[in-house]
Image (cartoon, helix red, strand yellow):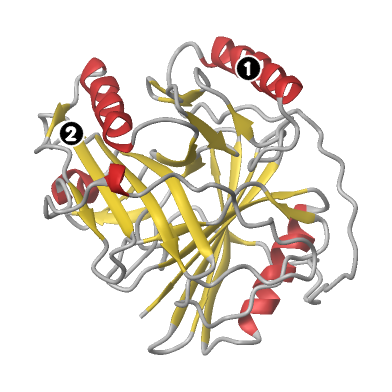
Amino acid sequence: MVGVGAEHEGHGTATTGRGGGRPMVVVLAALAVMAAVVVGVALVVGGDDAGDDDAGNDERREAAAGEETDGPVIPSAAGPPGTALGDGFTVIEGTVLIGDPIPTGDALDSDTIPRIDEGWTATLLVDGGDPEAIVEEYLRQAEEIGLARDGGTPCRQDVQDARVVVCVGFARSADRSEPRSLSVRTVRGRRTDVVSDHVVVQYSTHENAWRSGNQPAIDDGDPAALEPPAEWPSRPTVGDALPSANEITSVIPIQEDSRVAGPVRLNLDDTTGGIVATLEVTGDPGTVFQAYLDVLAAQADWTRGPDERKIGDATLTQARAGVLGGDSIQLRMVERPGRPVWLVIDGIHD
């Protein structure tokens, strides 16, 4: 059981530990004052027009930040409609990107041959859009780059909580030897202290995702029956614990030199579910990453990582910690020159 993306254990190639010279101290601060520096641009994973995409993303983010500074997504993280996600996909109307797409980069066995997934996962917030229409629009974008949709766009009620509705869509290439796929899902509803109205867009170049096809769903969920959130929970600040959705038992306080970029979302990729939080790292990335890993390790039965991998001009650092028969928490941090540093905390409970 894993969260968004694929299983991240056992990185098979080109990985280096980030342990040397990094302090192993949990930093719990009482107060942190962060400045919102609007320098964010969306991560462009592929395409020949990467430079043009970067420039366009800069302009869109700056315009959006000038229009709104007190929304649910912090200005440096907000990618408005038109922002390039990579590989021909863009942020659509009625949504806003939280941070940048996070590269996958996993070394997964493909017929015993290690292969890096060159895809990415983007998390967006619904901002006036209709969940089913959002799924349809991303499937249309997938068709424009040569992918064929697999199945419809069914919506279902969450098996654990009828107050949550998930809509899904899937498209893939015709040739398994060159696997490309897109999975898109919307998650709307509340589970205890987590309120979701999110879109998760996942592009993959690995055959495991290509083979998975559309996730089974029962057409018994109507997203229109659930009203969009009237208001969002306040963002946790330094020292506050991330919400748990009544699933995660690990206490994960916000560390100094980091801040929550937007509403924490529900992770319903396994039976019981969990949470996913995107944070902006405003201090030394290695120190902040290690602080979170120390917090998790102090509550865990096992840890893996940290491992570091270069993907293009991005540096992806990953680690996991968990409890046997309980929580499994993944940390994924992305550093790119001239861009904010993003840390994704993805937790599920067995």
Residue 172 figure quarter: top left
Up-down relation of residue 344 to residue 118 (above or below): below
Q: Is residue 107 left or right of residue 55?
A: left
The residue beneath circle 1 is 60
Residue at left offset 30%, top offset 42%: 224
Q: Amino acid at mark 1?
A: Arg
Of the 4 image quadrants, the one containing the C terminus is bottom left
Instruction: Name which residue lies at 45% across and 27% down.
Output: 94
Q: Residue at x 16, y 51 (%)?
A: 212
Q: For numbered disc 1, what is the local secondary structure? A: helix
Residue situated in front as seen by the camera: 111 or 220: 220
25 relative to 242 in the view: left or right: right
Of badges 1 and 2, the one in the foreground is: 1
Location of residue 294 (image quadrant): bottom right
**Placement of 125 over or under 317, stated as above or below:** above
Which quadrant is home to the N terminus? bottom left
On screen, 250 above or below 86? below
| Secondary-structure class at tag 2 | strand
Quote the CA–CA distance across marks 1 and 2: 29 Å
Residue visible at 19% across and 25% down in the picture: 147
Residue 172: image tag: 2
- Residue 318 in the figure: left or right of residue 339: left
Amino acid tagged 2: Arg
Where's residue 237, x and y in %?
77, 61
Instruction: Pick whichever, 47 or 307, lies toward us.
Output: 47
Q: Position of residue 162 (x, y in %)?
A: 28, 64
Decide: few, some or many residues near mark 2? Use Cα within 10 Å; few <14, some 14-19, many ≥20: many
Question: Where in the figure is residue 155, as x and y percent of width and height?
Answer: 20, 47
Whether residue 216 sits left or right of residue 91 in the image: it is: left
